[in-house]
Amino acid sequence: MPIEVEDLRFSYGAADALGGVSLCIGDGERVAIVGATGSGKTTLVQHFNALLKPQRGRVVVDGIDIGARKADLREVRRRVGLVFQFPEYQLFEETVEADIAFGPKNFGMEPRVEEAMAMVGLPTALASRSPFSLSGGQMRRVAIAGVLATRPRHLVLDEPTAGLDPEGREELLARLLDLERTTIILVTHRMEEAARMDRVLVMASGGLVADERPRTLFAEEGRLARWALRAPDPVRLMHLLGLAGSVLTVDEAVDQVLARV
């Protein structure tokens, strides 16, 4: 079942963070949410697992209206896993195994630690190690594995690759996109990551200003500039070379250049 948002409004004091957002994200979709700092991206996704509740409007997750008086918010949070930016700051247990197992145990589930570690590419030999003895990239994977261990239907990731080197970003994102039967909602400032999703939602000044396929959205650089965004690097390169076309990725750019040689 989908995540449905109807005329969602939310403010922090006198400052409006969301000004009437409506959207629907279907089961198994890969959706990117982009926008300038302060556009409302994080506030929006924090409603998806009921970390925030609507001040006006509705958010319905798999048929559960999170604003209803008797809504089962525990079940919403089990269904929607939320990974914050720099989630490694949330690690606290003595071992990797204990940290990953914490979430499932809290929900009364069997902790499948090895399975969750495999999902993010962590060797099982690290299970007995302190998470604080690991590299930054490994700590990030432990934190994400802890969310995946609860087997959420929908996974919300707020800048999951921030601070990682290019190789680490690529490998982690590829693993997350390979997850089956899981909706992936990715908040990112990297347009190259957004280009790999099914849809891109653009936030600006607390509103949803675009909901399009990446190939359509990134074809118009002038419109992106109005929202303080820019096209993925391969798209921009092709424009500089005077070879603008329906290119999104490095591989597509190489193919188009070779075809012109």
Image (cartoon, helix red, strand yellow):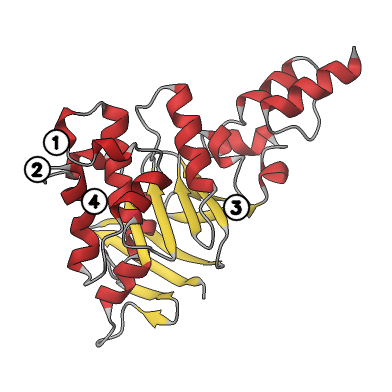
In terms of image quadrants, where is residue 95? Answer: top left
- Residue displayed at 57% across by 37% down: 226
Q: Position of residue 111 (x, y in %)?
A: 26, 61
Amino acid type at image mark 1: Ser
| Mark 2 touches mark 1? (CB < 8 Å) | yes
Name which of mark 1 and mark 4 comes first in the sequence. 4
Placement of 246 over or under 149, stated as above or below: above
Q: CA distance from mark 1 to mark 4?
A: 12 Å
Placement of 59 over or under 101, stated as above or below: below
Placement of 236 over or under 261, stated as above or below: below
Residue indicated by mark 4: 100
| Mark 1 touches mark 4? (CB < 8 Å) | no
Residue indicated by mark 1: 130
- Front position among marks 2 and 3: 2
Relative side of 12 to 189, left or right: left
Total numbered labels: 4
Residue indicated by mark 2: 94
Relative side of 157 to 202, left or right: left
Amino acid type at image mark 2: Glu
Name which of mark 2 and mark 1 comes first in the sequence. 2
Name which of mark 4 and mark 3 comes first in the sequence. 4
Amino acid type at image mark 3: Ala
Amino acid type at image mark 4: Ile
- Residue 210 is tagged as 3
Number of residues whose C-alpha sits closer than 10 Å to that of mark 4, classed few (under 14), some (14–19) or many (20 or more) = many
Q: CA distance from mark 3 to mark 1?
A: 43 Å
| Mark 4 touches mark 2? (CB < 8 Å) | no
Name which of mark 2 and mark 3 comes first in the sequence. 2
| Mark 4 touches mark 3? (CB < 8 Å) | no
Q: CA distance from mark 4 to mark 3?
A: 36 Å
- Residue 193 is tagged as none
